[in-house]
Amino acid sequence: MTSSASRQPPRLATSAAFGVLGVLLLLGAACTLSASPLPLWFRPEPSLAGLPQGPVLERATRRGTLVVGVRGYPRPAPPGAPTPAEPDSYDAAIAGRLAAQLGLRVELVGLAPSTQDAALREGRVDLVLAGAPSDADADAGRGVATAQGSYDQASGMLVALRKGRAQVAADLRDAPVCVAQGSSYASTIAKRFGARPRSYPSSVHAASAFMAGECQALAEDSEILDRLLRNEEWRFYKALSRGLAPQADAAIRLAEGDAASREFLSAALRAWRVDGTLQQARTLRAGNLQFEIGLLRDGLVCHS
């Protein structure tokens, strides 16, 4: 993944390191490079078929491929043997679902946070699905529009060491809290508890850093953390706060000036909340991340 906005972003590699759930998800969500046929749960929805499309989606239709900027990260691997960056499974699933509804193939492009908006403005990608936008870039948001709604509205949770410094959520004021890049909970914990979100390339990186003692707490989707807390190796941790409501949208972003495409994407988000698409993708992500985080106990490490 490149940090320069002027260079063509790399396509993300695909490997078998995800385990069964990850492989099924990435094959189904069209991990990009093979352009293989889409599976049945990506069947187009008739309810969106008659909606008008603007220039962004029309350009993708003429090309036959929807190009989507996403997060990506190396999966846990043996020390000294880093793996190439692969798509975030949740971003990949939603991008694949959208492409299927448009009758298109999908190509995923790994983008660092500081390059995402530039990639949209320059037309190197059609859309960006990379969680909640980062405001660290001084140029953030210029020339970029967002579809109404969020593709990740899951309730979150904070966990901490059972005998650590933070025994209640109020103890997190001015304390570092590990979050994944694009986390919708970063602004929540900053505003609600006065904590300092510390961002990592992915949820598995954030969990690894938390377990290594780099943060006082970890903020993540409650479905993921509930699964982890049932594991024997997580007996030293406890839930510090439940029911965290995201205060930032995991938005689908596109270049500004295309109201029709933006409205189509907003309608798709509404439909996915009703038909269970977002929940299904969330559950698959939880299983995938539980598997990846479980690899850490086997001596595998995260590579930044």
Image: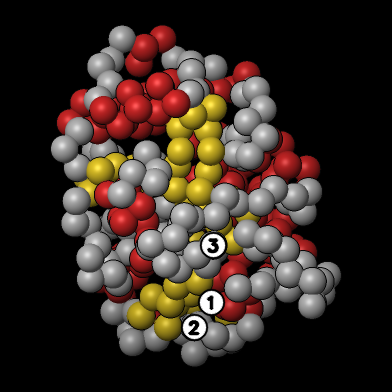
Residue lying farthest to the bottom in this orientation:
165
Q: Is mark 1 on a helix, strand or loop?
A: strand
The amino acid type of the residue labelled 2 equals Gln
Residue lying farthest to the front in this orientation:
7
Q: How crowded is mark 3: few (under 14 residues within 10 Å), some or many (20 or more)?
A: some
In the displayed structure, does residue 166 sit left or right of residue 49? right
Residue 28 location, quadrant: top right
Q: Which residue is drawn at 49% across and 83% down?
A: 216
Label whose residue precedes the other's in the sequence (3 or 2): 3
Q: Residue at x 73, y 69 (%)?
A: 82
Residues under numbered marks 2 and 1 in contact, where contact means CB atoms less than 8 Å apart: yes
The Cα atoms of the two marked residues, 3 and 1, are separated by 31 Å
Q: Which residue is drawn at 34% across and 70% down?
A: 189
Q: What element carries label 3?
A: loop
Q: Which of 238 and 116 is in front in this view?
A: 116
Task: Locate residue 80, reporting x and y percent.
Answer: 79, 77
The Cα atoms of the two marked residues, 2 and 1, are separated by 6 Å
Q: Residue at x 29, y 42 (%)?
A: 254
**Nearest to viewer (mark 3 / mark 1):** 3
Q: Residue 1 carries which label?
A: 3
* Residue labelled with disc 2: 216
